[in-house]
Amino acid sequence: MEDNFNQHEWFRKQRLSEAVSMDALDRIEGLANIRDLKLMKDSLRILTAEWMQEGFEKEDIKDYISYLIDNI
């Protein structure tokens, strides 16, 4: 199944701050293992949908994911 999510377009729509340029985004994704990146995106999509069904707000989920990253 092909991933129809366009992260570049999503970032534009979210008005990504100038702190992360499209060049940086391309570099980050270029350095990632494609299989691992797809697995991460798929997992985040599934978990986010489940959490939102349970009543969590998207901002709460973002905060939680940021917390996880900060504690790596």
Image (cartoon, grey):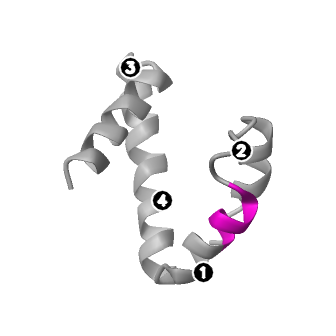
How far apart marks 3 and 4 lie (CA) works out to 19 Å
The residue shown at (19%, 48%) is 71
Give how far across and how far down residue 14 sits, in percent: 72, 35
- The prevailing secondary structure element of the residues shown in magenta is helix
- Give the residues drawn in magenta, as a range: 21-26
Q: Which residue is outermost to the front?
A: 19
Q: CA distance from mark 2 to mark 1?
A: 20 Å
Mark earlier in primary sequence (2, 4): 2
Q: Nearer the viewer, residue 32 or 37?
A: 32
What residue lies at 36% left-to-right and 40% top-to-bottom? Answer: 66
Judge depth for marks 2 and 4 and give the one in front: 2
Residue 19 appears left or right of 48: right
* Amino acid type of the residue tagged 1 in the rendering: Gly
Residue 3 appears in view: yes
55 inside magenta stretch = no
Q: Earlier in the sequence, mark 2 or mark 1?
A: 2
User: Relative to 54, does residue 40 appear above or below in the rendering?
Assistant: below
Residue at position x 64%, y 63% in the image: 25
| Distance Cα–Cα, label 1 vs label 4 | 18 Å
Tag in front: 1 or 4: 1
Q: Which residue type does callout 3 highlight?
A: Phe
Q: Earlier along the polypeptide chain: callout 1 or callout 3? A: 1
Residue tagged 2: 18
Q: Which residue is mark 1?
A: 30
Judge the density around disc 2: few (<14), some (14-19), many (≥20) Cα neighbours within 10 Å.
few
In the displayed structure, would residue 7 be above or below residue 53? below
Residue under circle 3?
56
Q: Earlier in the sequence, mark 3 or mark 2?
A: 2
